[in-house]
Structures are given as C-alpha cells and as structure tokens.
Amino acid sequence: MLQRNHFAIRVMMIVFICASAQGIFVREAQAIDTPQTPVEKKVALTFDDGPYGEPTKQILAILKKEQVHATFFVMGENVEKYPDIAKEIVDDGNVIANHSYDHPKNMTSEPTKKFDSELILTENAIYTATNKLPDLFRAPYGKTSAPLLKKLHNEKYLLVPWTLDTLDWNFPKSPASVIVKRVESEVRSNDIILMHDGRDTKIGYPRDNIVEALPIVIENLKKEGYTFVTVDQLIGKSAYFDKKVGS
Ligand SMILES: [Zn+2]
C-alpha cells in the first residue's frame, strides 16, 4: 500500500513537472512569436533664418495642409520685419526659437558682449510679436565656441544642432528633386532636419526649391511611417521660458 502510494505520488510529480515544463515552453514560444511593439519613428522638421515673407507663408500653408508642426529658428531682425508671420508660426501650433538677431558670419569670434545683444534683441522681437520667450537656440552656421556655450548655459538656453542637412541653402545646386532624394536616402528616426524658409535679408535668394520639395518630403516620410514632432517634443524639454525676466 505504501509502495503504491509512493508510485502514485511519483507519477503525479512527473505529470506536474511535464505540465510545468510544457507551460514554460508554451510561454517561451508565445514570447518568441509575440510581435515586438514597433519603435515609433519620429523626425523634427526645422526651418531657419525666417520669417521671410512669402516663402514662410507658403511653408506654413503646406504644414497646415499636411497637419504637421515644425520648429522655426528665426532671426530677430526678420521677426521685426515680419511680426505678423512670426505670430502666425506660433498660432498654427509650430514652435518658434532663437537663431540670433542678424545671423553674424562668425558669432564665435565676436566679443562675448555681442552674444548678449544677439540673444536679447531676438528675445525682445519674438516676445513682442508672439508673447513667447524661446529657450531653444541654434547657432548661425552651427558654429559654437566655449564662450558662446558658457553664455547659453548661463542663460539656460538649449543649443539645438541638426542631424540631417538638406543643403537647400546651396541654391541652385539643390533643386527640389535633389532635396527629396537626399532626405529619402539619409533619414533616420529622431533626425532633426535642417531646411530654410528664410535667409539673411541682405543676401536674399529664392526659396522655391524647398517650397516645391516640402510636400513631397512630408508625404514620403509619412509613407515610411514617420511622425512629425517639434524639437522640444523630440528632446523632451520645454520650448519656452515661463515668463520674461523683469516684465
Ligand atoms: Zn541660419
């Protein structure tokens, strides 16, 4: 009797172990078969050197039609020239950011005192036009230096570079078709894509290439499964200071 009981217990144990093992295998098989949650593909479109009159308005119309938001790194002197367009940028749900006052050729070799005026004059122009105080800054030509970085750090600005240059500024070497192909072949998730709605007002050149390329670039990226975010959303930081100091 005792032996039979022992036998029964051993059989039960073997069945239990087999069932458990099978359960583990099933769970493992399920884990292998379960499709991974797809990683969200994101890009941030950025436009520099505006607002610039008609080209900026055309770009805003395209973004609105495509239901996409972008980040505009504006020049203070252009905001003074086109305050209504600066306001339209923000009213449309886009982000406005600081890109210096007059786009100095070599901001890094300027005396540090010049940094103050480049930042403050632009802050004032943007605040007057939009009631926003950006805390995102992109250096003209992407050039930085230790004193400039220190100044930005002290003023609690976030320096924003780019990771994909459409080279649209290189007009006429970058017609729309070349810009479209360049983005298509180089784009990666989390890219910050550099384009230009404006230009130093003293130079001036047509923005036809980017206006023509933009809807195609957006459609292609949508087909590839990309979603569009503003830079602050991409890096998980705020785009604006809470309030103007001293106001
Ligand atoms: Zn620029």
Image (tube, helix red, strand yellow):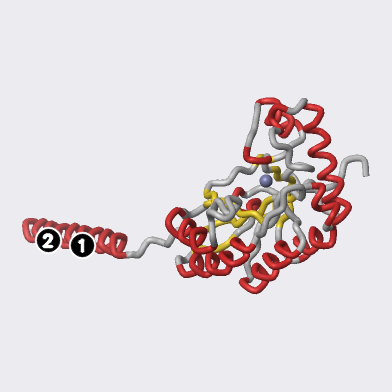
N-terminal-most mark, 2 or 1 = 2
The local secondary structure at tag 1 comes to helix
Q: CA distance from mark 2 to mark 1?
A: 16 Å
Residue visible at 45% across and 53% down in the picture: 186
Quarter of the image where one finds residue 111: top right
Secondary structure at badge 2 equals: helix
For image coordinates 72% across by 34% down, the residue present is 152
Query: Which mark is in front, 2 or 1?
Result: 1
Q: From this view, report whether residue 127 is shown above or below residue 103.
A: below
Vertical placement of residue 177 versus 124, above or below: below
Pick the quarter of the image with the C terminus: top right
Asked if disc 2 and disc 1 are in contact, CB closer than 8 Å, the reply is: no
Residue 244 lies, in percent from the top left, at: 87, 45
Q: Amino acid at mark 2?
A: Val
Which residue is denoted by mark 2 in the rendering? 11
Residue 108 versus residue 135 in the image, above or below: above
In the image: residue 246, left or right of residue 193: right
Q: Position of residue 133 (x, y in %)?
A: 80, 48
> Relative to residue 31, is residue 151 drawn left or right?
right
Q: Mark 1: is the Cβ under 8 angstroms from ligand 1?
A: no
Residue under the point 82% across and 51% down: 126
User: Which label was assigned to residue 75?
Assistant: none
Vertically, is 246 above or below 65?
above
Q: Position of residue 138 (x, y in %)?
A: 67, 43
Q: Between 170 and 30, which is closer to the camera in this rendering?
A: 170
Q: Nearer the viewer, residue 238 or 191?
A: 191
Q: Which mark is residue 22?
A: 1
